[in-house]
């Protein structure tokens, strides 16, 4: 019985030491200053979708359809859904990395497709991706 109590005490000491180490690591991270740059407001929508549908080649039905949305620099959006419901695909369509199978979309109210950007100097990126580059990113400032 005494040996069991000794083993329990040793285990509690080890758990306490591990917890203290984890707490120290968290405290160290909490001390890092975080600077969020004020980016102001971009004119017009960053992304706008009108009656957009998308279907991957070989699919019988649309992954999503009749999507109407407009996002500006003050929008905050959370996409929820099961795996395979099209959340990432929707973002890729908004940014112009994928062309919709129906409807129009684009930044600053300009319809885009990959084909319409070909051969235009400076248009090697999708319009949504280009507009997002002008939004300041959050960063960690070293002390």
Image (cartoon, rainbow, N blue to C red):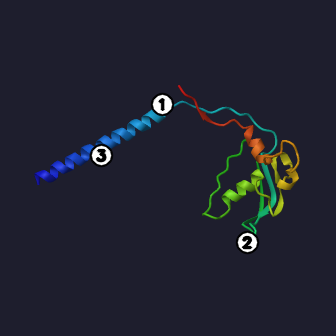
In the displayed structure image, the side of residue 88 where residue 9 appears, left or right: left
Q: For the residue carrying disc 2, how many other residues have a C-alpha within 10 Å: few (<14), some (14-19), or many (20+)?
A: few
- The residue beneath circle 1 is 31
Q: Is residue 53 above or below residue 128?
A: below
Decide which of 83, 59 is in the foreground and name it.
59
Farthest bottom residue in view: 60
Name the N-terminal-most of marks 3 and 2. Answer: 3
Secondary structure beneath dot 2 equals loop
Secondary structure beneath dot 3 equals helix
Could you tell me if residue 113 is visible in this image?
no
Mark 3 vs mark 2: in front:
2
Label placed on residue 105: none
Q: For the residue carrying disc 1, how many other residues have a C-alpha within 10 Å: few (<14), some (14-19), or many (20+)?
A: few
Rendering quarter of residue 23: top left
Q: Are marks 1 and 3 in contact (CB under 8 Å)?
A: no
Name the N-terminal-most of marks 1 and 3. Answer: 3
Q: Residue 115 at x, y = what percent? A: 86, 55
Q: Residue 9 at x, y = what percent? A: 20, 46
Rendering quarter of residue 52: bottom right
Label placed on residue 59: 2
Rendering quarter of residue 63: bottom right
- Residue drawn at (64%, 52%) of the image: 78
Residues at marks 3 and 2, CA–CA distance in whole angstroms: 53 Å
- The residue beneath circle 3 is 15
Q: Residue 27 at x, y = what percent? A: 43, 34
- Residue drawn at (42%, 37%) of the image: 25
Q: Is residue 119 above or below residue 81?
A: above
Q: Is residue 69 above or below residue 59?
A: above
In the displayed structure image, the side of residue 140 where residue 137 appears, left or right: right
Q: For the residue carrying disc 3, how many other residues have a C-alpha within 10 Å: few (<14), some (14-19), or many (20+)?
A: few
């Amino acid at each position: 019985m005494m040996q069991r109590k000794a083993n329990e005490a040793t285990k509690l000491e080890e758990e306490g030491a591990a917890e203290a180490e984890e707490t120290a690591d968290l405290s160290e991270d909490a001390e890092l200053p975080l600077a969020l740059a004020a980016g102001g407001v971009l004119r017009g929508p960053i992304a706008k979708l009108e009656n957009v549908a998308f279907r991957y080649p070989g699919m019988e039905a649309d992954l999503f359809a009749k999507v109407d949305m407009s996002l500006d620099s003050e929008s905050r959006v959370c996409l929820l859904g099961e795996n395979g419901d099209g959340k990432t695909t929707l973002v890729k369509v908004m940014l112009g990395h994928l062309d919709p199978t129906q409807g129009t979309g684009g930044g600053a109210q300009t319809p885009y497709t990959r084909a319409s950007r070909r051969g235009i100097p400076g248009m090697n990126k999708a319009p949504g991706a280009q507009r997002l580059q002008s939004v300041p990113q959050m960063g960690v400032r070293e002390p």
